[in-house]
């Protein structure tokens, strides 16, 4: 729940920022000189890109959460069996061991979104966020029945 609250607060702050930046862009355009109009348009592009990025990330999170809920209902969520350091961090060797099992499971069933979901969690636990995101995107695509790029 803490992660959802953090995401919501961060998204709200970004929206406020986008509005502030957008209003400055509009003010520059209203000034009316060629230079200020050019800068105003450039400044307006930044919030548009930011809103698009925020929207795509929100969609990703919602889809991943739906998969997690479905997997939980089936009883297939990965169990947290990782060893932790005294500080609470995940032990690297433990994460690597679980990752190896998840990778083998995914190689045995490459078209099963459940395996890709569990692999994404294992990547995340191993602190490999880019690969975790790609694995989760693949799980989402497989669940939706969309073609998956290799």
Image: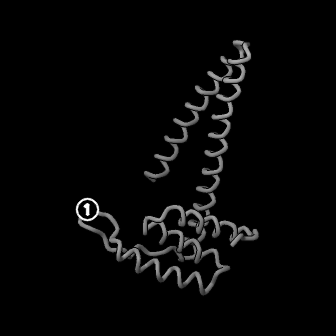
Q: Residue at x 35, y 72 (%)?
A: 92
Quadrant containing the C terminus is bottom right
Q: Quadrant of residue 109?
A: bottom right
Residue toward you, 70 or 110: 110
Tell me if residue 114 comes above or below residue 5 in the rendering: below
Q: On the picture, is 117 further left or further right than 122? A: right
Tell me if residue 21 comes above or below residue 119 in the rendering: above
Q: Residue at x 61, y 62 (%)?
A: 66
Q: Position of residue 32 (x, y in %)?
A: 73, 13
Q: On the picture, is 4 further left or further right than 24? A: left
How many labels were placed on the picture?
1
Seen as rendered, the residue at the extreme bottom is 108
Residue toward you, 91 or 11: 91
Q: Position of residue 115 (x, y in %)?
A: 58, 77
Tell me if residue 141 comes above or below residue 10 in the rendering: below
- For the residue labelled by badge 1, is the local secondary structure a helix, a strand or a loop? loop
Q: Position of residue 106 (x, y in %)?
A: 58, 81
In the rendered image, which residue does mark 1 sit on?
A: 87
Q: Residue at x 47, y 72 (%)?
A: 122
Q: Residue at x 48, y 75 (%)?
A: 78
Q: On the picture, is 102 further left or further right than 86? A: right
Q: Position of residue 133 (x, y in %)?
A: 56, 62
Q: How is the image coloured?
A: one colour
Residue toward you, 42 or 122: 42
């Amino acid at each position: 729940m803490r992660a959802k609250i953090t995401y919501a607060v961060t998204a709200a702050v970004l929206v406020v920022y986008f509005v502030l930046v957008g209003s400055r862009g509009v003010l520059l355009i209203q000034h009316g000189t060629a230079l200020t109009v050019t800068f105003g348009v450039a400044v307006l592009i930044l919030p548009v890109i930011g809103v698009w990025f925020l929207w795509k990330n929100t969609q990703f999170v919602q889809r991943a959460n739906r998969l997690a809920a479905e997997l939980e209902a089936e009883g297939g969520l990965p169990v947290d069996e990782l060893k932790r350091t005294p500080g609470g961090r995940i032990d690297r060797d433990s994460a690597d061991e679980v990752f190896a099992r998840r990778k083998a499971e995914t190689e045995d069933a490459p078209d099963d979104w459940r395996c890709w979901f569990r692999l994404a969690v294992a990547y995340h636990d191993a602190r490999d966020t880019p690969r975790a995101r790609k694995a989760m995107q693949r799980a989402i695509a497989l669940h939706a029945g969309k073609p998956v790029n290799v």
